[in-house]
Amino acid sequence: MSLPSSAPPAPRLSRSVLTPAPTQTLTQRLAAIRQATNPAASDANTLTREFSFQNADFERVRKLIYAKAGISLSSAKQDMVYSRLSRRLRATGKKTFSEYLDFLEQRKDAAEWEHFVNALTTNLTSFFREPHHFPALSAHLRHIAAKRKQINIWCCAASTGEEPYSIAMTVADTFTGLGGAMQISILCSDLDTNVLATAEKGAYFPDRVEKIPPEQLRRYFSKGTGSQEGMFCVKPELRRMLTFRRLNLLDSVWPVKGPLDVIFCRNVMIYFDKPTQYKILSRFAPMLQPDGLLFAGHSESFLHASDLFHSLGKTVYELAAGYPGHTPAR
Ligand SMILES: C[S@@+](CC[C@H](N)C(=O)[O-])C[C@H]1O[C@@H](n2cnc3c(N)ncnc32)[C@H](O)[C@@H]1O
């Protein structure tokens, strides 16, 4: 059967549309195919979206979150920004992104700024994430316990608490049986006030604690009751080591008491550009003990700050050899 001559020719899909770039998400592929098959509906997302969200709005969001939190959003994050901030438009009764962003900027409303920043942070974390770091931490703690009895640790992107509690369990396991009263202080900070509130509660649903070995789960958690029924709650003995504080790594003043033996700064630098990373690293360096350690995330490299930090492998860093006062950590 042949098509009537008035029928539009079937769209020809180019090879580049049919063969997706390896980094394309499913949403991006679908958008590319939609665009190729029906260019008239040039922005299908815009047509089906609840709120008007133009490129100019996305650029505005990008500038604002960069200035507030140092977070560099790539252009691939447009859909993410739309879905996360749509909730704020509903909550504030705004009809378009441009109206919401005007409101945000004109009102200088601290609470809305907090919601805006909280909505745009990515808080993925888990207990004993990047597990090789914890035996390394334990070995370092044993090494420094021979020299001093006060140990200060800063976990500067603590998210919902799984990371600092993993640190605390490692500390507690390390010092059991070592004797001598060790003074341990673990400062847990994050920019996002919502995740920090969850961290402070220290109560987790069963699927969140799956990665904790059963023996540690028994030792450091109790079964929740009342509103925490069905949850695993951090025991006060562990909780006592931790202090929680909202802290933006971009702020000019950090209320953090040094000298620090260990800094955990994992999976947050990836959101910052290199100059911002360097600025933060140059403030970490003088806060560390000469033999202190910096733990970074699996995809973070500080080679551009080799005057400050030297890699010990597996994303663990010590102060660079030329750094004033540096003492090899091991
Ligand atoms: C992906 S999570 C990483 C959590 C944890 N460190 C880990 O590796 O599992 C990144 C965290 O960095 C926080 N963050 C983003 N920008 C920040 C900033 N400017 N200052 C402090 N924390 C920030 C986010 O709120 C988020 O909780």
Image (cartoon, rainbow, N blue to C red):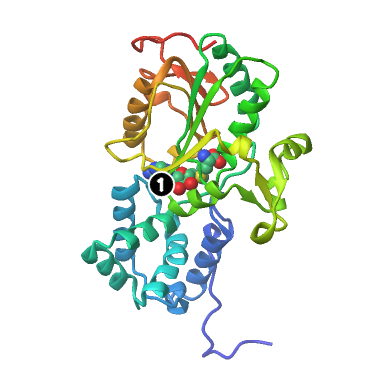
Instruction: Please report the residue visible at 66 percent of the width from the left and 57 percent of the height from the top.
Output: 228
The residue singled out by tag 1 in the image is 191
Residue 227 image-quadrant placement: bottom right
| Image quadrant containing the C terminus | top right
Q: Give the percent coordinates (x, y) of residue 108.
A: 24, 61
Q: Nearer the viewer, residue 310 or 251?
A: 251
Residue 104 horizontal side relative to residue 132, left or right: left
Residue toward you, 159 or 60? 159
Q: Residue at x 50, y 65 (%)?
A: 32
Image point (38%, 55%), residue name: 117
Amino acid type, callout 1: Leu
**Quarter of the view holding residue 258:** top left
Q: Residue at x 52, y 57 (%)?
A: 16
Count of numbered labels shown in the rendering: 1
Q: Is residue 129 visible?
A: no
Q: Is mark 1 within 8 Å of ligand 1?
A: yes
Q: 10 Å neighbourhood of mark 1: few (<14), some, or many (≥20)?
A: many
